[in-house]
Amino acid sequence: MASDGRVERIASSIRAIPNFPKPGILFQDITTLLLDPQAFRDTTDLFVERYKDKSITVVAGVEARGFIFGPPIALAIGAKFVPIRKPKKLPGEVISEEYSLEYGTDKIEMHVGAVQPNDRVLIVDDLIATGGTLCAAAKLIVTNNHFGRRGSYHAQLSNCFSPGHSGCPIGSHKGFSR
């Protein structure tokens, strides 16, 4: 990890809001990071530095904050961007996956065929609470291509997953790495 002050600048620019969206939740608000152009650039640069030589072909951004960071990362590393959205937001044929939140359940969708066999996928979201959104996004990528029958895949999850988290066994899932 960078020891040049970027991580500290990024961390100090994120505001924590207690009891939002409901009591007991400590919400990590990145809108304050977006108000700081240097912290925003540092965030994108750190991702680009980490993944530029990893042969990533797809950056999948989870709605909505994955849409903020995903496209500049995809452009910088020469990958395509695939949006993963809330239900009924994408036109055309989609696949969906339901997942658990800290405060209920939700569903995400992705276009059928957006990720191809042998693509290397970086999934971008803003934080991990229960791990449900990240696991659902990874399952969409696998389901989208029927991997295991038609080809291979690799989804790079990196720092976006807590190794001790008990929700989704994604770290041990075939083709996934952190």
Image (cartoon, rainbow, N blue to C red):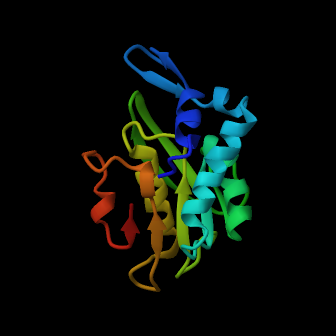
Near-viewer residue (26 or 114): 26
Q: Position of residue 102 (x, y in %)?
A: 38, 31
Near-viewer residue (24 or 114): 24
> Where 50 falls versus 4 (above or below)?
below
Q: Position of residue 152 (x, y in %)?
A: 44, 82
> Where 132 falls versus 80 (above or below)?
above
> Where 29 falls versus 5 (above or below)?
above
Rendered residue at 41%/30% (across/down): 104
Rendered residue at 44%/47% (across/down): 98
- Say whether residue 111 is visible: no
Rendered residue at 59%/34% (across/down): 9
- Residue that protrudes farthest toward the bottom in the picture: 150
Quadrant placement of the C terminus = bottom left
Near-viewer residue (125 or 135): 125
Side (left or right) of 130 relative to 157: left
Q: Position of residue 88 (x, y in %)?
A: 65, 46
Quarter of the view holding residue 39: top right
Quarter of the view holding residue 172: bottom left
Q: How many marks?
A: 0
Q: Position of residue 19 (x, y in %)?
A: 45, 14
- Say whether residue 105 is visible: yes
Quarter of the view holding residue 99: top left
Rendered residue at 68%/40% (across/down): 40
